Structures are given as C-alpha cells and as structure tokens.
C-alpha cells in the first residue's frame, strides 16, 4: 500500500470511518490493480451488496469472495471497524492492552468478545521472527534475569529466568550532522541457564555468521570467535558506567522489557515467558512501523507491500523507545 499509515487517532478515524471504508481497504490491499475472481480469474468490477460490504461477487461466474478469508476477521460477527480499531490499539499502544481495556475502549458489551479478539490479534505477535540479525550491523549480546514477583504471591523474588538478547546497533546522521546510534532488530530467548552451550545455540539461530558481537566478560561467550563471529569481550566488573558505554542498546532493551513485564503484566510465569518475549520483540522491531504491525495482527501482512526495514528506519528518530 502506498497509502501512508494513519499517525493519529483522528487520521485513523477518518481513514476507516465505516464498514465500507474498511472493506475497501481490504480490497485494495488484496487486489491493488482491481478485483480478480479467485474462481475464474475474470477481472473487472464485481457485484457489491449494501448490507454485506466484505463480500464481492464475480459478474462472470457468480462466485462470492469474502474479503476476510484468510484473515483473523474471518467468520466473526464483530464489525470490521471494531477489528481495525482493536488492531490499531493493540499495536500502537506501547505497553499493549488488556482485554478489559479493549472492551472498555471499543464499547463492547461482552468481555468474552474482547478476550477472543485480543487472543486472535496476539497470534500474529507471538510468532517468532525467524531470520537472523546482524551482518553489516554490529551486535550487542547479553543475558539478564527477568521474572520475579507474580500476582498474588506477595513480595520477594520468585521464578527468575535467564533471558538472552541480541540487538543490532545501527547508526544514523542526526539533524545536527552528528552520528547517533539506535537499536535495530532485537532477538530474545528464555534460557534454562547461561551456559556456553545455551548461549552459542542462541547465537547460531539468531545472529548471521561473521557478525561483530560485543559481550561482557562472561566465559559463556568465549567460544563465539571460534564459531566465526568477530567477538569483542568487554570486561565490566559490574562497573555500571562502563556497562552503559559498552552495551547500551541491549541494556536499554532489557530495562524496557522488565518494565513492560512488571508494569503491564505484573510479572509473568516461566511457562508463558516465551510468548511474552516474542510479543515484546514484535513491538520493539516494528516500533517505527505501525503499518506492518497493524497488518500482521489482522493477518493481511502478506498482502501488504511493505517498504523495507531500512526504508522505514531512514530518518526516524528512536524516541518511541522510552529511556527508563
Ligand atoms: Zn468468477
């Protein structure tokens, strides 16, 4: 879609003002050059129905085609406009949304409807990003303990789990002509331990061969060079200032992750942690690019012609990611 994604609530409201506008959008996304019947390949204007805007009928073979087929909106009685709003809210609100918040904001009469919608929209977010990061961008890699207090368990430290993370350190020219770094793509994974074996398995799966990787001095990283990475180990001795200087991006990601887990979810059990990590990574990696997030959760991402990652990162500032 060449159409810019609405940046404000008001723009969104104007763009998707009614069911017809939403179904027109789905139609343009699926057939940018005009309707082609999936049954008989005939092109040309389809029949439309006033009371069923999400259905097109072929004038040639009379077959009806649903615009929501293959999307999360298929076969639900909830209006498209409500789905679009839900996808917008879920993907643009930094901390994410609870079913109760969604129910209230969309004025849904049943909590169950909001819960089911949220569940379906989250499927697109908890699918892990599979491609490997790095290559021309240097990587910061580190591990952190997350988890802790779970709702109803009172104070104290419970269920801490190791999470390993790797993030691309990208550069851009700031407006004053200075070089500024910002976090590119992120990968996170829950680990049983932070052994050499676990960390190396994570690297192999998530980081392009021969990438430059900076870590702290933990011996679990000692084998990275032998694996073909350009490994730089920084001995930190718990020196906070040095940590911020050497591994600023992955620590920013970790502190945002911890704040999100505690603030929004009041702690997360080890069992559910992987899904939450994937959701966090989904949000993090698409934070400058709401169109991709919106289309992904609705299940229409494969139909949307998206600009490349570099296109949408060009000239953006990273203020969407809050400093803790
Ligand atoms: Zn046809």
Image (tube, helix red, strand yellow):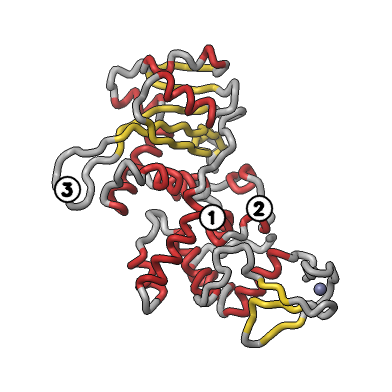
Q: Assign a secondary structure to mark 3.
A: loop
Mark 3: give few (<14), some (14-19) or many (20+) Cα within 10 Å.
Answer: few
Q: Where is residue 8 in the image (x, y as percent from the top left)?
A: 50, 66
Left or right, residue 218 beside residue 3: left
Which residue is identified by label 1? 293
Which residue is identified by label 3? 153
Q: Nearer the viewer, mark 2 or mark 3?
A: 3
Q: Quadrant of ligand 1?
A: bottom right
Q: Where is residue 45 in the image (x, y as percent from the top left)?
A: 80, 78
Above or below, 225 against 151 in this view is: above
Mark 1: give few (<14), some (14-19) or many (20+) Cα within 10 Å.
Answer: many
In the image, 271 versus 141, the foreground residue is 271
Please give the name of the residue rendered at 30% of the width and 52% of the height, measured from the top-left corner: 265
Above or below, 142 against 283 in this view is: above
Which residue is identified by label 2? 306
In the image, 274 versus 95, the foreground residue is 274
Q: Assign a secondary structure to mark 2.
A: loop
Quarter of the figure that contains the N terminus: bottom right
Left or right, residue 203 beside residue 247: right
On residue 146, the disc is none
Q: Position of residue 141 (x, y in %)?
A: 44, 27
Measure how far apart labels 1 and 3 are at the Cα level.
34 Å
Measure how far apart labels 1 and 2 are at the Cα level.
11 Å
Measure how far apart labels 2 and 3 are at the Cα level.
44 Å
């Amino acid at each position: 879609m060449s159409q810019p994604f609405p940046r404000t609530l008001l723009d969104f409201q104007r763009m998707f003002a009614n069911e017809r506008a939403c179904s027109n959008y789905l139609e343009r996304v699926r057939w940018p050059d005009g309707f082609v019947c999936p049954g008989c390949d005939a092109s040309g204007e389809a029949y439309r129905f006033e009371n069923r805007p999400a259905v097109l009928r072929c004038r040639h073979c009379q077959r009806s085609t649903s615009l929501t087929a293959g999307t999360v909106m298929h076969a639900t009685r909830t209006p498209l406009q409500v789905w679009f709003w839900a996808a917008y809210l879920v993907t643009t609100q930094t901390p994410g949304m609870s079913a109760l918040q969604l129910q209230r904001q969309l004025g849904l009469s049943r909590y169950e409807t909001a819960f089911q919608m949220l569940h379906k929209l989250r499927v697109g977010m908890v699918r892990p990003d599979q491609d490997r990061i790095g290559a021309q961008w240097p990587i910061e890699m580190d591990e952190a303990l997350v988890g802790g207090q779970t709702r109803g368990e009172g104070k104290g430290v419970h269920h801490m789990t190791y999470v390993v993370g790797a993030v691309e350190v990208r550069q851009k020219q700031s407006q004053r002509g200075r070089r500024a770094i910002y976090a590119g793509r992120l990968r996170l994974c829950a680990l049983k331990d932070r052994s050499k074996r676990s960390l190396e398995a994570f690297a192999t799966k998530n980081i392009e061969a021969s990438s430059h990787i900076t870590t702290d001095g933990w011996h679990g990283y000692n084998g990275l060079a032998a694996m073909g990475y350009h490994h730089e180990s920084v001995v930190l001795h718990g020196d906070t200032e040095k940590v911020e200087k050497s591994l600023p991006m992955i620590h920013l990601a970790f502190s945002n992750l911890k704040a999100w887990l505690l603030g929004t979810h009041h702690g997360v059990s080890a069992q559910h942690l992987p899904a939450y990590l994937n959701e966090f990574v989904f949000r993090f990696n698409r934070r400058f690019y709401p169109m991709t997030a919106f289309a992904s959760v609705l299940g229409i991402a494969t139909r949307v012609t998206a600009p490349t990652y570099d296109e949408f990162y060009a000239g953006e500032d990273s203020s969407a990611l809050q400093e803790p």
